[in-house]
Image (spheres, helix red, strand yellow):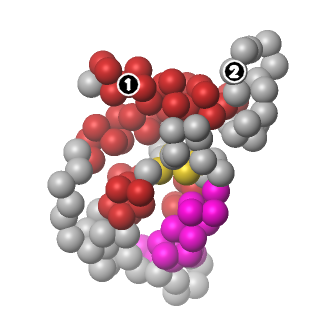
Amino acid sequence: MIGYYKYPRKDIVKLIKSSPKTYDGLYYMKDFPSYNGKASNLIGERDTKYFYSREYFKDKVCFDDNEIDLYIATSEKKIDVNKMMKRDEKIKETINELSEYNLYDKIPGADYNLAELIDTTIYIFNIKN
């Protein structure tokens, strides 16, 4: 049905929290966009109780604890959602072709792994913004 999701947010949060963390402590769940956007053919979760639409999280693969709270928030939070979305877009753009690697796998031809690349991307993004 339109507007229903296969995976409830609470179940997705359990998956996020069981995901590996970068060196800076961000949960990395490369399959999050698939879980987040998967519509249900049957009646699933309607999402009407949550303040922030799943659309805000469509590019997200990395979470800190505040962003997990934002994902399941039922009222407005004091977080710059637009900045978060821009950061998520930058991470997606940076690691897009490398998302096949596990977080701590050495990237062929590079002196870093995916976790280091993610943390560095966020560090530079935060300096510029």
- Residue plotted at (60% across, 47% down): 21
In the rendered image, residue 128, in percent from the top left (x then y), is placed at: 30, 19
Task: Based on the picture, tell me whether residue 11 belongs to the magenta stretch.
Answer: yes
- Residue plotted at (57% across, 70% down): 14
Question: Is 123 above or below relative to 88?
Answer: above
Report helix, strand or loop for mark 2.
Answer: loop
> Mark 1 or mark 2, which has the lower sequence index?
2
The front one of 68 and 54 is 68
In the rendered image, residue 74, in percent from the top left (x then y), is placed at: 26, 74
Question: Is 13 above or below relative to 123?
Answer: below
- Label ID, residue 56: none
Residue 40 appears anywhere in the view: yes
Q: Is residue 96 left or right of residue 56?
A: right
Q: Is residue 22 left or right of residue 77?
A: right
Quarter where residue 122 is shown: top left
Q: Which residues are magenta?
A: 1-19
How far apart marks 1 and 2 lie (CA) works out to 18 Å
In the rendered image, residue 19, in percent from the top left (x then y), is placed at: 64, 56
Q: Nearer the viewer, mark 1 or mark 2?
A: 2
For disc 2, the marked residue is 112
Question: Is 3 above or below relative to 110?
Answer: below
- Residue plotted at (52% across, 61% down): 37
Task: Based on the picture, tell me whether residue 44 belongs to the magenta stretch.
Answer: no
Q: Amino acid at mark 2?
A: Tyr
Q: Amino acid at mark 1?
A: Phe
- Label ID, residue 125: 1
- Residue plotted at (33% across, 27% down): 126
Q: Is residue 114 left or right of residue 90?
A: right
